[in-house]
Image (cartoon, rainbow, N blue to C red):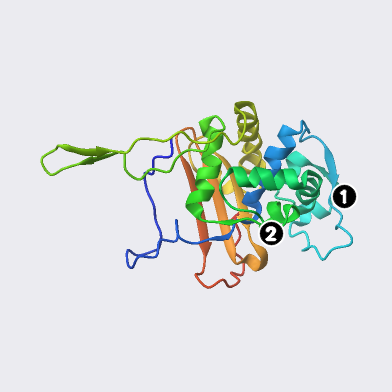
Amino acid sequence: SGEVLAVAGSCTYSGEWNRATDIKRSIGSTGKLFPLIGVHEAGVSLDQRVSTRPLRGRDWPAEPNSRCVARGTVTLEFALAQSCNRPWTEMAMWLGPKLTDIVARFDMGPPVSPALVPIGGVQTSPMKLARSYAALKNDGVLPQVRYLATAIGPKGNILGIVQAKLQPRVMSRATALAILDDLRGPVKRGTARAANSIHALVYGKTGTSSRNEDALFVGLTERFAGSLWLGYDLPQPMPGEHGGG
């Protein structure tokens, strides 16, 4: 629904800096959501096999996941679950300007390059990231973020009601349902296996930015959507930290 139940912007309640809403940081591989939408809209099956060998002609970052490199070719489903970068970068390049249009649907501004979208080319806040994934449980409609539904006075009188506004559809209901099914992969057998400790049906995706400066997880249950970001205000590497942890 977009109604916010809880926000934590720091470890302590101090100051006006809310990291959940005010920062704009690389979302790492959680950005694979956007080419995933494009692939489904183009009718491409996640059973399609794609090479994991390094892309030539550009200075692409090395594939961080050894399980991706060792196989030579993997399915897009495997590449999503294990967060393999090379296959999804290829699909992003194939989608091209179409992918830029998909990102724009979510009110995040243009990415650095379509090819970089699945590996951190999008920068946004944890709140906007959670909102983007929440559209999957909202039949493909981007929910309006609402912190208040009703304002009540000291005598119990209603001071005002925050009316939900009509929000844009960012994907079809069929695409949203298909992607929800896809996002069970990272949780069941991929980089988000730690989410199995939650005793609920969880859909999710991990993300790590370059040099491990940002670690993220976005998760969905039947009722809730949430995102977690770990990092420093002044970006610096976090050795050993990654979205899958």
User: Measuring 73% from the left and 52% from the top, which residue is drawn there?
Assistant: 114
Amino acid found under the numbered disc labelled 1: Gly
Q: Nearer the viewer, residue 145 or 242?
A: 145
For the C terminus, the image quarter is bottom right
Residue 41, numbered circle:
none
Image-based side of 9 in relation to 161, left or right: right
Q: Nearer the viewer, residue 119 or 94?
A: 94
The answer to whether residue 33 shows anywhere in this view is no
Amino acid found under the numbered disc labelled 2: Val
Q: Secondary structure at mark 1?
A: loop
Give the residue at the far left of this rendering: 155
User: Measuring 77% from the left and 59% from the top, which residue is drawn there?
Assistant: 63
Q: Position of residue 155 (x, y in %)?
A: 10, 40
Q: Position of residue 94 (x, y in %)?
A: 81, 45
User: Measuring 66% from the left and 55% from the top, which residue is drawn there?
Assistant: 111
Residue at mark 2 to residue at mark 1: CA–CA distance: 28 Å
Q: Which residue is mark 2?
A: 112
Q: Secondary structure at mark 2?
A: loop
Disc on the earlier residue, 2 or 1: 1
209 up-or-down from 32: above or below: below
Structural crowding at the residue carrying mark 2, measured as other residues with C-alpha within 10 Å and reported as few (<14), some (14–19) or many (≥20): few
Are the residues tagged 2 and 1 within 8 Å (C-beta)? no
109 up-or-down from 156: above or below: below
Q: Quadrant of residue 162?
A: top left
Q: Which residue is mark 1?
A: 72
Structural crowding at the residue carrying mark 1, measured as other residues with C-alpha within 10 Å and reported as few (<14), some (14–19) or many (≥20): few
204 up-or-down from 215: above or below: above
Q: Nearer the viewer, residue 148 or 227?
A: 148
183 up-or-down from 123: above or below: above
User: Measuring 62% from the left and 54% from the top, which residue is drawn there?
Assistant: 207
Q: How many marks?
A: 2
Q: Tell us which disc is closer to us: 2 or 1.
A: 2
